[in-house]
Every structure is written in C-alpha cells, then in structure tokens.
Amino acid sequence: MDFTVKFDSNASIMVVNRAPAAGEQATHPQMNSLQYCVIGYLSGPNHNGIALLIEGAGAEAREAAGNFLLSGNQLSNPEKTLRGAKFPFFEVSLKVTSVQAIALTATVEAYRTYPNSY
C-alpha cells in the first residue's frame, strides 16, 4: 500500500505516503482535532479474493473512514473519479477533523487506483 499508518518510538501517530505524487505530502501527523486515515480496497495476494482495509490514527479517524464508505454523498466524488467498467481497486488517504471525540468532516487528501489489478 502507498498509504499506511505509522506509530513511531516517540508515541506519535501519522499516515505515511510512501510514494507522494506532485503536490502531496509524505507524512500527515495526527494532531488534537486533525487526524488521518487510510482506506484500501485491494486484491488479495495472488489475486485470490478482495480485502477492505481501514486504518486510522485514532477512533475518530476510523469512524470517519467507515462513514465515508457508507455515505453516498461522501463517496460520490471519488466514485466518479474511480468508476470504470469495473469499480477499481483503490487506496485513499482522508483528512479528518474532529471535536471532542466526534468526527466532523473527512476529505480526500490523496488516492490511487489500480484498475488492472483484477
């Protein structure tokens, strides 16, 4: 995966973009009201099965990722970008704002599609 959640020895949590495209940041550190999460809809090893992965820097980020997947409104914009003959495998990094342990917004920071991974 290009996007992954990393826990370092200083107890800080961040989402790492292993291959940043032009204009993308390599790391997204978690802050009090700003967190990041990753969603991956990917082919299994040897293309045998499908995996849906959700990683988050905190509970609010993971909740926002679930809401993002289940909300027609939030998934509609990336879905237009991702849509093809078959819904492609993809990864997306989301920026999540929260207040008092409640996720408020989730916006796409970066995404990758893998349309030929079937």
Image: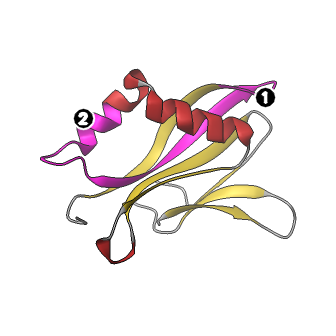
Q: In this view, does 37 lie above or below 42?
A: above
Residue 33 in the image: state x and y as whole percent: 75, 33
Q: Name the residue under label 1.
A: 101
| Residue 100 placement: quadrant | top right
**Front-lying residue, 2 or 115:** 115
| Amino acid type of the residue that numbered disc 2 sits on in the rendered structure | Lys
Residue 30 lies left or right of residue 53; in this view the side is right
Under tag 1, what secondary structure? Answer: loop
Q: In which quarter of the image is the C terminus?
A: bottom left
Going from the N terminus, do you reach mark 1 or mark 2 first?
Answer: 2
Q: Does the magenta stretch include residue 4?
A: no
Please rate how many residues cluster around mark 1, counting C-alpha atoms within 10 Å: few if below 14, some from 14 to 19, many from 20.
few
Residue most toward the left? 85
Q: Can residue 22 be seen in this view?
A: no
> What colour scheme does the image use?
secondary structure
Q: Does the magenta stretch include residue 88?
A: yes
**What range is drawn magenta here?**
77-103
Residue 20 in the image: state x and y as whole percent: 46, 63
Q: Name the residue under label 2.
A: 80
Residue most toward the front? 48
Q: Is residue 5 above or below residue 8?
A: above
Q: Which residue is drawn at 53% across and 42% down?
A: 94
Q: Which residue is drawn at 16% across and 46% down?
A: 84
Q: Is residue 75 above or below residue 83?
A: above
Under tag 2, what secondary structure? Answer: helix
Q: Can residue 6 be seen in this view?
A: yes
| Amino acid type of the residue that numbered disc 1 sits on in the rendered structure | Ala
Please rate how many residues cluster around mark 2, counting C-alpha atoms within 10 Å: few if below 14, some from 14 to 19, many from 20.
few
